[in-house]
Image (cartoon, rainbow, N blue to C red):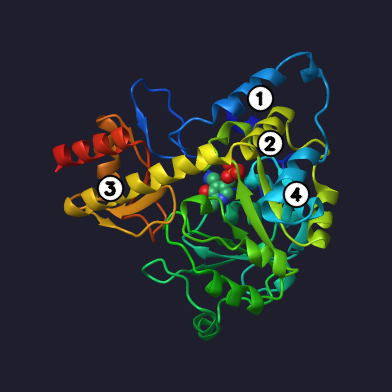
């Protein structure tokens, strides 16, 4: 009795929007000994020894000081890498933060999101499904309107003509979020196709390239060419720095300046800045890792296909695979019993699939062995 009175009492204190919100569910981070973790697309290889040394060297009395508020050195290095100016770069606490800043900077809050209400494109955030499952949560948190448009059945992207015919896609949406290469599908999209889509949009377009280092092509040129296009990148996946939370946008200085106005003053922690700077000084180390991951991806795709899985072509550090014989959720459990953790999503378009992160060759072999046993 007392419990229900309490929860009713506190509900009154919480904004309706937050009370009703379904929060983002991150992949599990279990502490099971000997578990092979292939569920959250982390890099199986550690950061470069030089990055570890730089972080260690920075751990001293200086931790009492605030970090550089604009990640100045890091932005200068990123500008050099992408052949632009520091004013074209905004760094965040992971790319999740820069994506959230985009909703708050470019999208009006909807006054009336009730069914039947006339939709105002200035309140609309649109994205394809399936894509990064954080997007709808960011829209809900902001109190904006979602426009989720399905990819083609094979997870390719509908072209502009098809989107026009479909009449659901909003060419005036305030913000369009495109995961490229796609997650969880894994497919890469041609820069020419992305360019066409960007040209057709009147609002801001974010190309979320979290996995692009494992792909054959990237679309950074579009952010430097179009004044309404931003590219989001992260140090998490390819650069083995999930723990440090560093991501960034590249784009027109006016968009970057607007985002910069609403970011927290010290949004990027000092050790994260140091780790990311040292990463950019040792890119050769990481490129060797990408090559290994792509090789393992090719091997795992071939082996699982032989065993009856339908594996989608991937340009990322994971594969989406439809397992044979049993439902995907049963496979998830059976693999877990063999100490292999992969990811399964309940979203209807992908419920028949498992998303498997590409680990080391040893981890990939263990997965194939476990699959053989289950079969
Ligand atoms: N974009 C995509 C498509 C992702 O899968 C992720 C990681 N879940 C992110 C962005 C965010 O990465 P981070 O916040 O670690 O930079």
Question: Residue drawn 39% across and 56% down?
Answer: 314
**Residues at discs 2 and 1 in contact (Cβ within 8 Å):** yes
Dots 2, 3 in contact, CB < 8 A: no
What's the CA distance linking mark 1 and mark 3? 35 Å
What residue is shown with label 3?
299
User: Is residue 22 in view from this perspective?
Assistant: no
> Residue 340 occupies which quadrant of the picture?
top left
Q: Earlier in the sequence, mark 1 or mark 4?
A: 1
Choose top left, top right, bottom left or bottom right for residue 337.
Answer: top left
Q: Is residue 65 above or below residue 100?
A: above
Placement of the N terminus among the 4 image quadrants: top right
From this view, report whether residue 203 is shown above or below residue 272: below
Q: Which residue bears the numbered disc 2?
A: 277
Classify mark 1: residues with Cα within 10 Å, few (<14), some (14-19) or many (20+): some
Which residue is disc 1 drawn over? 54
Disc number placed over residue 90 in the picture, else none: 4
**254 or 74, which is in the foreground?**
74
- Sequence-first disc among 2 and 3: 2
The Cα atoms of the two marked residues, 2 and 4, are separated by: 14 Å
Q: Mark on residue 146?
A: none
As helix, strand or loop, the secondary structure at mark 2 comes to helix
Q: Is mark 1 within 8 Å of ligand 1?
A: no
Give the image location of residue 269, x and y in percent. Answer: 73, 31
* Residue 17 position (above or below residue 361): below
Q: Could you say where residue 364 lies in the image, as x and y percent from the top left?
A: 29, 39
Mark positioned earlier in the residue sequence (1 or 3): 1
């Amino acid at each position: 009795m007392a419990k229900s009175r309490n929860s009713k009492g506190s509900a009154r204190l919480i904004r309706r929007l937050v009370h009703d919100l379904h929060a983002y569910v991150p992949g599990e981070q279990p502490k099971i000994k000997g578990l092979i973790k292939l569920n959250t697309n982390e890099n199986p290889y550690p950061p470069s020894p030089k990055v570890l040394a730089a972080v260690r060297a920075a751990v001293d009395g200086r931790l009492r000081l605030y970090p550089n508020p604009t990640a100045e050195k890091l932005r200068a290095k990123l500008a050099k890498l992408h052949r632009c100016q520091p004013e074209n770069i905004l760094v965040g606490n992971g790319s999740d933060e820069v994506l959230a800043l985009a909703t708050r900077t470019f999208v009006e809050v909807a006054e009336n999101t009730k069914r039947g209400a006339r939709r105002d494109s200035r309140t609309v955030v649109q994205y394809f499904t399936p894509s990064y499952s954080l997007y709808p949560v960011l829209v809900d948190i902001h109190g904006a309107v979602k426009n989720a448009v399905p990819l083609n059945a094979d997870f390719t992207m509908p072209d502009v003509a098809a989107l026009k015919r479909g009449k659901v896609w909003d060419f005036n949406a305030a913000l369009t979020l495109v995961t490229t290469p796609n997650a969880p599908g894994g497919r890469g999209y041609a820069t020419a196709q992305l360019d066409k889509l960007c040209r057709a949009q009147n609002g801001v377009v974010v190309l979320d390239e979290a996995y692009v280092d494992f792909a054959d092509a990237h679309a950074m040129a579009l952010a430097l060419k179009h004044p309404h296009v931003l590219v989001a990148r992260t140090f998490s996946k390819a650069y083995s720095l999930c723990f440090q939370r560093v991501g960034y946008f590249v784009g027109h200085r006016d968009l970057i300046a607007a985002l910069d106005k609403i970011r927290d003053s010290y949004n990027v922690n000092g050790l994260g800045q140091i780790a990311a700077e040292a990463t950019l000084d040792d890119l050769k180390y990481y490129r060797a890792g990408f090559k290994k991951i792509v090789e393992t991806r090719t091997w795992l795709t071939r082996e699982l296909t032989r065993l009856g899985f339908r594996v989608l072509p991937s340009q990322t550090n994971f594969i989406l695979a439809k397992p044979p014989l049993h439902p995907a959720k049963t496979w998830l459990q059976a693999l877990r019993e063999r100490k292999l953790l992969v990811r399964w999503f309940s979203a209807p378009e992908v419920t028949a699939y498992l998303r498997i992160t590409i680990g080391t060759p040893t981890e990939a072999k263990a997965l194939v062995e476990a699959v053989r046993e289950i079969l």
